[in-house]
Image (spheres, rainbow, N blue to C red):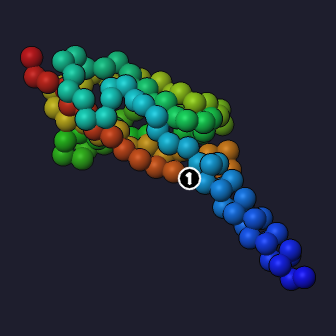
Amino acid sequence: MMKKPILGSVFLSLALITGHSFAHTTLLSSTPANNSMIKQAPEKVTLNFGAEVMLMNIKLLDAKGKDIPLNYQVNHDHKKSFDIAVPQLKAGQYTIVWMIMGADGHHMKGDYRFTIQAK
């Protein structure tokens, strides 16, 4: 007789765990792409996520880790894609560091690199 409540609890636990893992999203693509070598400096960076998220923070770092200011203001828009204007960049390696908040309130972060080739 105890098998039904235990079995029900197991299925409920699995459903909650599985549902929680699907609530999180990842960065699907970016422009410039991760580890890309580009010939011309981009005017913007684009982040494309798998679900609607709020972009909480984004940083652009040069090869020495120096923060390059971006004109991005956090707002409460939940979107799948974000375009962020960047200042004129010289040849070199750059890192984009981002932090998002999913619909469930969970914060996720990541980074990627791209290189602008010297002319």
Which residue is the site of mark 1? 107
Q: From the viewer's side, name the closer residue of 5 and 16.
A: 5
User: Which residue reaches farthest bottom?
Assistant: 2
So how many labels did they put on this image? 1
**Which quarter of the figure has residue 97?**
top left
Quarter of image, res 9: bottom right
In the structure shown, which secondary structural element does the residue marked by tag 1 occupy?
Answer: strand
As drawn, is 60 to the left or to the right of 24?
A: left
Instruction: Classify residue 49 as left or right of residue 65.
Output: right
Residue type at numbered disc 1 = His
- Does 36 sit left or right of 112 as displayed? left
Residue 91, placed above or below residue 57: above
The C terminus lies in which quarter of the figure? top left
Residue in the picture at 47% in, 24% down: 83
Q: Please say whether residue 62 is visible from this viewpoint.
A: yes
Query: Looking at the image, is 36 positioned above or below residue 15?
Result: above
In this rendering, position of residue 9 left or right of residue 24: right
Q: Position of residue 68 (x, y in %)?
A: 31, 36
Pick the residue in front: 110 or 51: 51
**What residue appears at the point 66 percent right and 61 percent down from the top-left corner?**
17
Q: Is residue 27 above or below residue 9?
A: above
Residue 51 in picture, x, y percent from top left: 60, 36
Residue farthest toward the left in the current orientation of the protein: 119
Q: Position of residue 105 (x, y in %)?
A: 66, 52
Assess disc 1: are there few (<14), some (14-19) or many (≥20) residues with their C-alpha within 10 Å of its C-alpha. some
Q: Position of residue 89 (x, y in %)?
A: 24, 25
Residue drawn at 61 percent across, 30 percent down: 79
- Residue at horizontal 46 percent and vertical 34 percent from the top: 28
Placement of the N terminus among the 4 image quadrants: bottom right
Residue 75 can be seen in this image: no
